[in-house]
Image (tube, rainbow, N blue to C red):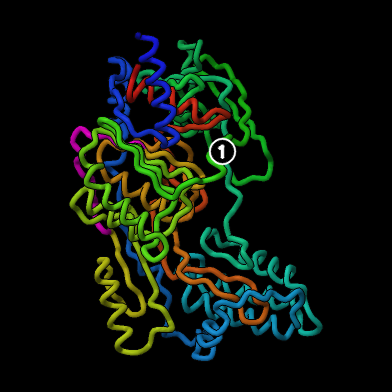
Amino acid sequence: MVKAKKRLFILLVCALIAGQASVSFPACAGVQEKQEISEIIQEINQKNRKLDAPDISLKKFCYNFKNNKQKLNKKDISIMWKDYNRKNIKKNIPAVSARKEVKWLFRLLRSQYGLYTYYGGDAKFARAKKAVLKEIGTKGSIKTKKYQKLLHKHLDFITDSHLAIGEELFSPDTRLFSDESVRYIKYNACFYKEGNPGDKILSINGKKPEIYLKRAIDNDGRLAYFPYVMLEQKDNICSYSIQYQSGKTEYITLKPARYVYKKNVKRMYGYEKYDKLAYIEMNQAYMDWETPKERKRFLKDVDDMKKKEQLVFDLRNNTGGDGSLVDEWFKKYTGKTLLPNYSTLRIRPTAISSKRELAEMDEFAASYGLKKSGRYYYYANPGHQYLDNGSRQIFVLTSRMTSSAAEAMTDALKNIENVITIGTNTGGVLINMANYSMAMPYSGLFLQYGSCLQHFDSSYFKESYGIEPDIYLTGKNLKQRLKKFFEIYVTGL
């Protein structure tokens, strides 16, 4: 009988991770494990309680639109909307046309790109334009692929993962490196190699060990410490030295971490109810005009979410969507307006000129708490927010696919007590938004850009590096590890 119950429970946990069960769920974690996870939650609470937007003025990121530099004109704007849906990309472009397009593009960036000043303003962008024009020349033609590479080459100081020219993003190849061959333990705020508890680790790669050693789920579903680091490098290997108190030096080899999740998403949204737990599979931040049914179901289920002792938010396959959904969910779940952990600066759309349209834009911005200053709307230092969640716990599953609005959801959840993120660093696509997309007027190349700056404390979020999880989950057998973790620490056996 006991064996039968145990087998049934394991099947239920498997169903939980897959989001395919809809039956009662026992919750009886072991005393020791329950105490351990409780202490970890308190540690995470202390860390998240300090999260806030950077306490700085956004004025330094505002462009001086009153200067005599060339900006978008009426003809430019008509070209933008005329070619909005154009998909015909030419193989070659006459040099004269390419030069016209470059000048148009840089007028557009100066007038409407939200990160123009953030990435150096006229000084940097003028040099880039000059370099691109020089390589294009004045005669003959240029291959479109080469032209696209030129733009990326000379604008390589931009690391905005929402900006794209020719379907190619301005996102550096940042990867998560790790080594799970050796377990490490933490005792009294000091780190030790498992099996060698008497020799404290003083440093790794010349830095404090906690810079690299992160809490993770091991192959048996138990909590341990493994080295992790996000790196921008082409090499698939890096070696770090470990200095021990005894004077011993040891070397570890880090390789790209494995964190592949589902390859095929079968549903956009799933909500599975158990006795005291609910599993929420959210694979898109649903636009109201694209998937209204899923959006409505998600918001409708919030009433039931508030009744559960534990929630599992699975955002591992969510690449983003509509950020307003995050605000709506937060307000329904907490009863409070979300105060994100970043400041916002947004340029008023250049195409808006009539008094009626300007008034409507001002009203829209004000509805989101944005104030107006010249051509900018801003939400500087929205205010510290950390809300009580009673005895309820929320587990957020993330991956490198968790991007944009899904990262905004991850950030919002950190403003609520008793939230644990499990997985990998998120995608790192949040410093800007993809407000506009169109075909460039002469080449036909796809252009995507945003008029927004979302400014974070770099120690918390950095573009392409993402938000770090509280507990890492990497390896070949992620589903099994996660299942075992929930068996041991959350639901028990």
Where does residue 404 sit, x and y in percent of width and height? 44, 55
Near-viewer residue (353 or 111): 353
Q: Please tell me whether residue 217 belongs to the stretch shown in magenta.
A: no
Q: Is residue 350 above or below residue 19?
A: below
Residue 96 lies left or right of residue 242; in this view the side is right
Asked where in the image residue 420 lies, by quadrant, the reply is: top left
- Any part of residue 223 in sight: no
Query: What segment carries the magenta color?
Result: 382-395
Residue displayed at 56% across by 30% down: 475
Q: For the residue marked with disc 1, what is the amino acid?
A: Val
Quadrant showing the C terminus:
top left
Q: Is residue 429 above or below residue 265?
A: below
Where does residue 417 sit, x and y in percent of width and height? 25, 39
Q: Is residue 487 above or below residue 372?
A: above
Question: Residue placed farthest to the right in the image?
Answer: 140
Q: Residues within 10 Å of mark 1 (few under 14, many from 20)?
A: some
Where does residue 466 sit, x and y in percent of width and height? 47, 47
Where does residue 169 sit, x and y in percent of width and height? 59, 60
Q: Is residue 280 above or below residue 359?
A: above
Residue displayed at 23% across by 45% down: 386
Near-viewer residue (284 or 97): 284
| Disc 1: which residue | 260
